[in-house]
Image: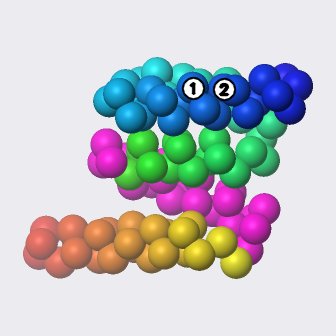
Amino acid sequence: MKKQNTKNQVIRACVCLERGDSPGAERLARQILAAEPANRSALHILAGIYLSTGRQEQAAKMFRRILKIEPGNADALTLKQEIAARATQATEWAR
């Protein structure tokens, strides 16, 4: 996928999200990652979708990928900590 095509796909995925079309945004983000596995925008989009749809483990996986590419990414670090806190909270509620 050419750089301009990737940029257009990211924009289209964001528009899908704004319109409430998470499945469309997810499909586009996956297409981007198939061509560019280190595309941070697509990783963020997928992580956000996974997080908002209760797929914490998949969201955490995306955040780990982002942190491998950019170890100091503040958003990824914060959201990864939020996932860990949710997991801890769920464990405590299960007791």
Q: Is residue 79 left or right of residue 33?
A: left
Color encoding of the figure:
rainbow
Q: Amino acid at mark 1?
A: Arg
Q: Position of residue 63 (x, y in %)?
A: 58, 60
Mark 2 surroundings: few (<14), some (14-19) or many (≥20) residues within 10 A: some
Q: Secondary structure at mark 2?
A: helix
Residue displayed at 21% across by 68% down: 90
Q: Main secondary structure of the magenta part?
A: helix
Q: Amino acid at mark 2?
A: Gln
Q: Nearer the viewer, residue 56 or 32?
A: 32
Residue displayed at 22% across by 75% down: 89
From this viewpoint, which residue is outermost toward the right?
Answer: 2
Q: Is residue 27 magenta?
A: no
Say whether residue 34 is visible. Answer: no
Rendering quarter of residue 19:
top left
Q: Is residue 79 left or right of residue 90?
A: right
Residue displayed at 53% across by 44% down: 45
Residue displayed at 78% across by 23% down: 5
Q: Position of residue 28 (x, y in %)?
A: 59, 25
Q: Quadrant of the N terminus?
A: top right
- 11 is higher (above) or lower (below) than 44: above
Q: Position of residue 67 (x, y in %)?
A: 69, 67
Q: Are marks 2 and 1 in contact (CB under 8 Å)?
A: yes
Say whether residue 79 is visible. Answer: yes
Find the magenta span and give its range: 52-71
Q: Mark 2 = which residue?
A: 9
Q: Is residue 69 magenta?
A: yes
Q: Mark 1 = which residue?
A: 12
